[in-house]
Image: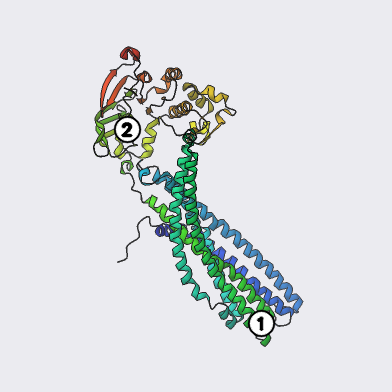
Amino acid sequence: MIKPLSKNNPYRLFLGTLRKHWLAYSLGMCAMLITSFSEVMLPKFIQWAIELSTHKGEGPAFFRRADAHETLNVMIAFLLINLTIGWLGRVLWRQILARQTHKAGHHIKTKIWSVLKDQPLSLLDRHSLGDLMNRATGDWNRTRFIHGFTIVMTFDLIFFTLLSTISMMMIDVSTALLCMVVLPFLPRKIIKISKEEYKLHDFAQEQLSLLSDLISQAVNTIRLQRSTASEGIWLERLGSYANEYAKRQFQVLKASWRIFIIAAIPTLFSYGVLYTYGIHQIQNGTLTIGAFLALQSYVLLLQSPLFELGNNISEWQTGFASYKRISELYDLEQNEVYADEPSGDIHDVAILTQNLSLTYGQDRMILDSINLKVSLGDRVGFIGPIGSGKSTLVHAIAGLSENFSGGIWVCGSSVDSSSREWMTAKITMAPQKPFLFAGSIRHNLAPAVTLPDHELIEALRCVELWNDVEQFPEGLASWIGEWGINLSGGQKQRLSLARALLKPSPILILDDCLSAVDSVTEAKILHNLGLFLENRAVLWTAHRLSSLQLCNRIFRLENGTIRDIAQLHTDTQKPISELSGREIDFATS
């Protein structure tokens, strides 16, 4: 029994695209047929003109006029019309079919993003970052080409071959058959090499994924390499991976060149036939000079499709090999916890957890039956030793952790039945290790929306960063490198915090977001934060108790459990120093 194609089988996806855009592809094919017909007619015009000039023929009856000179003028006029029609056909198919390449590229990359954005963080345990980058760039580029330019190449080959063959047969059957006698023997050999090339390409792409991942690691650890003088070790590893990729890619190129050489055989053979048997036919008077030149022109026209045959098969093979790797991303199990829209908001309770537990491995309990209720307006702080589960708890509430037991509700809706878009609208997080884009400060503050500069400046003033930004040559337009490499650790955290404050979500999670900020600057920021935290449910993790002085409830996490160590009411709140009597640093406790 033939196994049915899976939903995300690359061949089924490709055929689905053809069916969806059948009108565009049909019009493009018609335009290509017109263009090919126009080019195939050129040798015929040459034949008719030479035969008319040498008195070996009068040309088609349609062109005949009172004398040969007038007939030749008519032929030239129709030749110009033919060239114009061919040019228009070429413009048309380029506008239609070439554009399909870019449309397919947009669709594929959008779908890749739509799948990956809802995947759990554990995806990186199965696919390295370099592998995902390679699939979304190199494989994506090859895949989009088979939806446009490769189709153009294929039909160009088919139309030229058929029309040229028919035209040659109409001139002289015996000469045409001899010129093309080797053609039937080529496909089997070329297909065999193409299958080999398919496997080699897949093999090379796997190595490119490893190389991309290693490059990513090397760039991210460049400062560590300098401080430990380990640049040479990394350079040696990168060179080894790059050489292995070059070796595998060269094997792909060798297979492609073997196809190219085989495809050149018919052209050489055809010229041999023309300059032996063809000349013999001329001497016998069965073939005119015009017909000989036309046959030679057709052999020259056939040369391009034959050379393209190997490259065309290679494009299809590597294209579908890459499409298969992309379809593997499509096949990633969709995270069911984000499948359905929530039934609605419950405004009284922003966050509710019941018996929330989470383990790493078989026996390491990180969270053990956590029960927590947070209302809008509450500011809840969490302290505890490193590894006590503070970040794990807030990540689970934000929907970033998986494989937990118990229940988590956000604004009255379980995270098990809330879409990623809905969760993102409700929760904003400022992490301890912020991600910053390689772009301007303005773009990093508001990457998804456009906000007026005065709002951006207000947020930067709140986090005590505006004075630094003012010193930059271009202010808000100043460019920062990827991951904010141009900024200090404290500046990165403050920029990330400002971005979080600008997003009007009801729940704000601050995951030790001021750990790299000095105590004086931190005190100023805490003094400024009040207005930005109003009417929000705030979860705040920290190692220093002083960082949580704006919180009205503080819990200590240890051994997977939480203990309420401070409960303050906003109207009678006392300084944290009065609760603790001293500064406590739980990072070392």
User: Residue placed at 48% from the left, 71% from the top?
Assistant: 187
Residue indicated by mark 1 = 279
Whole-percent x, y for residue 210 in the image:
43, 48
Front one among 161 and 138: 138
User: Is there CB contact under 8 Å for labels 1 and 2?
Assistant: no
Q: Mark 2 points at which residue?
A: 392
- Residue 208 percent location from the top left of the image: 46, 50
Which residue is drawn at the image coordinates 33% and 25% (left, top)?
376
Query: What x and y, as percent, mark residue 587?
Result: 34, 24
Give the structural element (helix, strand or loop) at label 1.
helix
Q: Hey, what amino acid is under mark 1?
A: Ile
In the image: residue 56, left or right of residue 560 = right
Asked whether the viewer can see residue 135, the reply is no
Q: Position of 569 compared to 15: left or right?
A: left
Indicate the quadrant containing the C terminus: top left, top right, bottom left or bottom right. Answer: top left
Residue 156, x across and y down, in percent: 55, 65
Q: In which quarter of the image is residue 434?
A: top left
Label 2: few (<14), some or many (≥20) within 10 Å?
some
Could you tell me how far apart the alpha carbons at marks 1 and 2 are, in whole angstroms? 85 Å
Q: Residue 488 carries which label?
A: none
Q: Looking at numbered disc 2 in the image, what kind of residue is underneath it?
A: Thr
Q: Which residue is more in the foreground, 16 or 462?
A: 462
Q: In this view, does 464 lie above or below 250?
A: above
